[in-house]
Image (spheres, coloured by chain):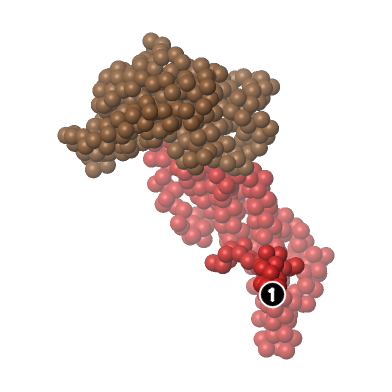
Amino acid sequence: MLQVHNASVFFPARDGRVVHALDRASLDIDANSIVVALGASGCGKSTLLNAIAGFLPLSDGSITLDGRPVERPGADRGVVFQKDTLLPWKSVAENVALGLKFAGVPARRRRERAEELLGLVGLDGFADSTPHELSGGMRQRVGIARALATDPKILLMDEPFGALDSLTREQMQELLIDVWARTGKRIFFITHSIEEALFLGTTVVVMSPRPGRIVARFELDFVRQFAAERDVRAILSSPRFAELYDEIRDIVHRPHHAGPHHEGRPQ
Amino acid sequence: MTDLTRRDESVIAPPATPKLVRLHPFGLDGARTAPISLATALVLVGAWFLVAEFRLVPPLFLPGPQEVLAQFLAIAEEGYAGATLWEHVSASLFRIFTAAFVAASLGIPLGLAMGLNRWAKGVFDTPIEFYWPLPPLAYLPLMIIWLGIGEVSKIVLLTLAMFAPVCLSAQAGVRALPIERVNAALSLGATRWQIFREIVLPSALPEILTGLRIGIGVGWSTLVAAELIAATRGIGFMIMSASHFLATDVVFVGIGVIAVWAFAFSYGMRLLEAWLVPWKGKL
């Protein structure tokens, strides 16, 4: 289990003031769950993800993965970035197997595993392409396969579909659910789309800015329903979905008290 | 009625040869320039020929193309100033190659280190920023006083001239590295050395190659200066020696030879770039 306990982050802003980016956030991510952090930009959701990934130390509080404190980045937490970070000089298969190369896995085994994972994300036959031959959606699939290659305990996804067009985005959401259902990975997912959050999350935490904090939590099962029945329309048109959508919208748009600190957009 | 029908058909069926259109271009937009360049070259050579042929300028100042060509063949066969043309060229090439090799093997690692390490940057920034805007001719006398008049002083002069662009471009290559790429590698379990080898070095490679290209260009322009130092061989020496005897045609031959080699180098570097960094500018 991944546990975030009272995590706070303060940044120095450029003008010398202090940005309170994350305020006492607590979160548990259990096996087999997708926790979605939802909020407008500046609400601290990326800060939270960066802290879990180990890119950013906490000012206060703790993060533990299966009881061990998280201090630096590691292969036990796979990250999928908003902007794909594939290496343009490597083939798709080499990109997928990058983590295995770092771990010293022999070349043949790496190749087998890469092809297996490319199959999982629906990219059979693209192993020898180069990243710039792929579309944005396909590159994000490679990014997901790459993050899965080292068999991490959790997948951290920072608005991974934010830059995709809406049609590709829907396909990618369904793909992610398939991957999740098949691998049973726990996932921490960031988005600013309420619909995406409702559709993907087993838990949705709503965050608000200034300072970034968790203001609401919802336990949902639309994603399990989709994994079982594969009927998007039934989910999107269900009254419960619409109800929750409105409820979350109200929370997101509710004016929040400005904190004592200056607003900042964490990266 | 029939008229109308016929008119309709003409709207639906495309003409046999449709008029192809595209967006109005702005600037060059990939238009072919090679024929224009070739025509320009022909006009220039033609003008040169005419000026020389009708003695608009005395041959001492401007020998005609055919005289230069004849001189080129003569030098290629008999040599000039005590060495054959190939001996002059190979002496120069040896100096440039050696200097480029030394400059690259010092400049690339040092530049990368300066991009990554506070101490490397702090220590080496001042001397490099201080010396590199200096024209090589300005510190040429020092090279002679310190290193004598042999090959060493020439190669050191060329190396110094080439080192700065290579080193600065390697630094720029590291600085242009997106932090997400490093973070991605870290979250895949990379060690520091793996990050350097798999991420930093290839990311900086396009910039490094650009620096090498600039460096070699600087090398050619410093070559003549380097060969002022008591050389007995070298294409720069040949030009200087010919100028003392007002052998303008030999000067022209030397300039032409340098131009051809410099062009070949630059073309070779472009091929090397296409081979090593085919992704440049694509992602």
Residue at 61 percent across and 49 percent down: it is B99
* Colour given to chain A in the rendered image: brown
Residue at 43 percent across and 42 percent down: it is B124
* Colour given to chain B in the rendered image: red
Can residue B52 be seen from the camera position used here?
no
Chain letter behind tag 1: B
**Residue with the most extreme front position:** B1
Position above or below: A161 against B186: below
Position above or below: B196 against B84: above
**Residue with the most extreme right position:** B77
Between B9 and B15, the residue placed more toward the observer is: B9
Task: Give residue A231's position: percent from left, percent from top.
Answer: 51, 27
**Residue with the most extreme top position:** A67
Residue at 27 percent across and 19 percent down: it is A6
The number of callouts visible is 1
> Is A107 left, or right, of A238 in this rendering?
right
Between B191 and B261, the residue placed more toward the observer is: B191
Tell me the quadrant of the picture where the C terminus of chain B can be found: top right
Kindly identify which residue carries mark 1: B3
> Is A157 left, or right, of A168 in this rendering?
left
Amino acid at circle 1: Asp
Residue at 62 percent across and 42 percent down: it is A133
Tell me the quadrant of the picture where the N terminus of chain B can be found: bottom right
Between B218 and A108, the residue placed more toward the observer is: A108
Q: Quadrant of residue B216?
A: bottom right
Position above or below: B169 against A258: below
